[in-house]
Image (cartoon, grey):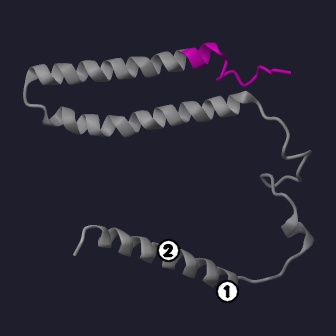
Amino acid sequence: MPSYVGVALCSLIGLVFICASLIGASVLRPKRPFASKTEAYESGMPAVGDTRGRHEINFYMVAMLFVVFDLELAFLYPWAVWFAGAQTVESKIYLGAVMAVFIALLGIADIVAWKLGVFDWGKRSD
């Protein structure tokens, strides 16, 4: 059996599951539309203003910082496994130095974001 057959089979099963879930939900769900169901929902409060308005850049900057630190954790786990498997002291020192540089660069990114005022939610840019 070729190696791609397993991938194709899993993809087909996933596609069938998605289609069956969507069709099943549309058949089984109750259909009782009324005005309050079609309104915009904003954390339990009535919608205020246009939803396509401008937002503070701080939201996007914090989201980007989250992605940066999330990627840090994604790189940290394989590094830790590699570090645990290192046999010599020299390789452990080298791997420790590499991680120290990586953490320092992330710390610099955090300091730059702090200096740019990303974490200052009281400040308005009007």
Foreground residue among 2 and 71: 2
Q: Residue shown at 22%/24% (left/top)?
A: 95
Q: In the image, 126: left or right of 11?
A: right
Name the amino acid, label 1.
Leu
Q: In the image, 84: left or right of 17?
A: left
Residue 93 position within the rendered picture, expressed as x and y whole percent measured from the top left: 17, 19
Of label 1 and label 2, which has the lower sequence position? 2
Residue 126 position within the rendered picture, expressed as x and y whole percent measured from the top left: 86, 21
Q: In the image, 23: left or right of 50?
A: left
The stretch drawn in magenta includes residue 116: yes
Q: Is residue 23 above or below residue 74?
A: below
**Magenta segment boundaries in residue numbering:** 112-126
Q: Quadrant of the N terminus?
A: bottom left
Q: Dot 2 corresponds to which residue?
A: 15
| Quadrant in the rendering for residue 53 | top right
Q: Residue shown at 25%/67% (left/top)?
A: 3
| Quadrant in the rendering for residue 38 | bottom right
Helix, strand or loop at label 1? It is helix
- As drawn, which residue projects farthest toward the bottom? 27
